[in-house]
């Protein structure tokens, strides 16, 4: 079999009211095609489905992940540290694979902390964020020696008691709720009233409390937003975050050893969206890295990425179990849907439902096309994987492949809803 990557235009979506074509999806070139089938890790999709032993399943491609990390390493300053935010995809095998390729792992719960440590992540490169850390989680993190991004005065008081009781002086960074937001973000996590972090004007008081508590202060964590495709907006937030950290450092009880500027790097999901331009972000980070050498000698400058590292490396694969026509509209009914992939169904924060890029994964070279809706097996009209998309004509037994499924898929979905069979994950 000779793999190839043909010039495949993504499926077109139409406007329900007047059937006008809408903008196309960005090209999905991360998976090669051979003999008309998507290849995941070099394996044809039908063969992979047989190897997995069932549909639906998620498949994550090691080669795609490695290429993304290598691309970032080549583009960004050599001294910059790249952390993986594992909330994007906490599959243990994937976390273990990432642990050997990035400089640190960011966790957001005690459960994720266990996965990261079990996967072999160095505790010195693990950071723990989240607005509702329990006393038990804080004890576990302090004992493990990971860096805790404190997000309230309550957490400082709790860590002080832990130090007195156990002798474990926790490593801490302050998660700052900045006085700005990441413009154009799909999900805003800073600026204005937020449950995340500590408001910038309250940080000096928190830093004083950290000093009195005898905790090991290490630096600052700023995360203004996520899923952004505007390079200049990301660069602006990084500049503002850096300036804010420099100002707050004057009140710190110890020199800054780590400055996490967050992430926000997005991937194209919907028609009309295009991939993020790394060049302006890289140039901006090069400037900030030079400033950091002067302002924070010996400190690590960090960016924290989740979906950007793994999102494009994943496919959700389901099998068509029925084909029907209702009032002239073709419905392909699959054995998977929103209970496994809530974001692709449009029920994960979308105001207006938009299609993820979708293909019939074993008919990639087919010239016979049709406009079809792909529905899942659930007894609800919300269960759609594609709504009136132009696709290869498909039959019962064919495989539906949903791109951009490597992040916020499996664990972000209501998998027990309506009691259908479970989905599995594989790292290929």
Image (tube, helix red, strand yellow):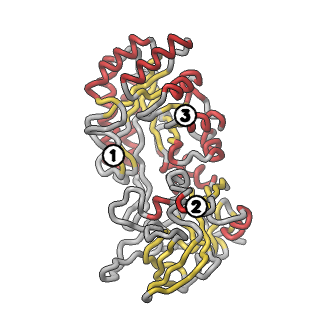
- The image quadrant where one finds the N terminus is bottom right
Q: As rendered, which of 159 and 315 lies closer to the eye?
A: 159
Mark sitting on residue 419 = 2
Using the image, tell me which numbered label, if any, was put on residue 229.
Answer: none
Residue farthest to the bottom, as pictured: 328
Secondary element under disc 3, as helix, strand or loop, is helix
Q: Residue, x 35% and y 18% (percent of image)?
A: 207
Give coordinates of residue 175: x percent, y percent: 39, 30
Give the mark nearest the N terminus, 1 or 2: 1
Q: Which residue is mark 3?
A: 110
Q: Judge from the rendering whether residue 385 lies leftward or rightward of residue 113; answer left or right.
A: left
Which of pointers 2 and 3 lies earlier in the amino acid sequence?
3
Which quarter of the figure has residue 364? bottom right
For the residue pair 146 and 130, the one nearer the viewer reads as: 130
Q: Closer to the camera: disc 1 or disc 2?
A: 2
Instruction: Kindly identify which residue carries mark 1.
Output: 188
Q: Secondary structure at mark 2?
A: helix
Nearer the camera: disc 1 or disc 3: 3
Q: Residue at x 57, y 45 (%)?
A: 90
Viewer-nearest of labels 2 and 3? 2
Query: Which element is circle 1 on?
Result: strand
Whole-percent x, y for residue 32 in the image: 61, 66
Q: Front-most of 342 and 84?
A: 342
* Residue at image coords 68%, 68%: 44
Determine crowd level at label 3: few under 14, some 14-19, many 20+ residues with C-alpha closer than 10 A.
some
Q: Is residue 137 above or below residue 344?
A: above
Q: Is residue 54 left or right of residue 161?
A: right
């Amino acid at each position: 079999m000779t793999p190839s990557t043909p010039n495949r235009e993504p499926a077109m979506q139409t406007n329900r009211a007047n059937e006008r074509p809408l903008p196309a999806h960005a090209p999905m070139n991360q998976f090669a095609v051979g003999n008309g089938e998507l290849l995941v890790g070099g394996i044809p999709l039908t063969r992979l489905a047989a190897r997995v032993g069932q549909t639906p399943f998620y498949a994550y491609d090691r080669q795609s992940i490695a290429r993304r990390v290598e691309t970032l390493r080549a583009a960004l300053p050599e001294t910059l540290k790249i952390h993986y935010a594992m909330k994007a995809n906490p599959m243990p095998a994937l976390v273990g694979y990432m642990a050997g390729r990035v400089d640190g792992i960011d966790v957001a719960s005690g459960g994720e902390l266990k996965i990261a440590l079990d996967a072999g992540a160095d505790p010195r490169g693990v950071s723990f964020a989240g607005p509702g850390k329990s006393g038990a989680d804080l004890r576990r993190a302090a004992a493990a020696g990971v860096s805790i991004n404190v997000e309230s005065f309550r957490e400082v008081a709790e860590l002080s008691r832990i130090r007195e009781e156990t002798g474990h002086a926790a490593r801490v960074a302050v998660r700052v709720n900045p006085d700005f937001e990441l413009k154009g973000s799909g999900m805003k996590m800073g600026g204005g009233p937020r449950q995340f972090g500590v408001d910038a004007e309250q940080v000096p008081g928190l830093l004083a409390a950290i000093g009195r508590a005898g905790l090991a202060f290490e630096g600052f964590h700023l995360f203004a937003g996520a899923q952004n495709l505007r390079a200049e907006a990301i660069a602006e937030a990084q500049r503002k975050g850096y300036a804010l950290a420099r100002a707050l450092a004057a009140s710190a009880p110890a020199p800054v050893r780590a400055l996490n500027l967050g992430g926000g790097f997005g991937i194209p999901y919907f028609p009309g969206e295009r991939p993020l331009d790394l060049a302006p972000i890289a140039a901006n980070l090069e400037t900030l890295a030079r400033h950091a050498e002067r302002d924070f000698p010996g400190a690590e400058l960090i960016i924290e990425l989740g979906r950007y590292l793994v999102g494009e490396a994943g496919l959700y694969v389901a099998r068509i179990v029925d084909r029907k026509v209702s009032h002239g509209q073709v419905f392909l009914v699959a054995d998977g849907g929103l209970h496994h992939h809530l974001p692709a169904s449009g029920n994960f924060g979308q105001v207006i439902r938009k299609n993820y890029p979708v293909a019939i994964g074993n008919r990639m070279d087919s010239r016979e096309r049709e406009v079809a809706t792909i529905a899942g097996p659930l007894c609800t009209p919300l269960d759609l994987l594609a709504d009136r998309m132009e696709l290869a004509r498909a039959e019962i037994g064919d495989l539906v492949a949903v791109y951009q499924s490597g992040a916020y898929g499996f664990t972000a979905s209501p998998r027990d809803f309506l009691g259908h069979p479970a989905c599995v994950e594989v790292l290929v």
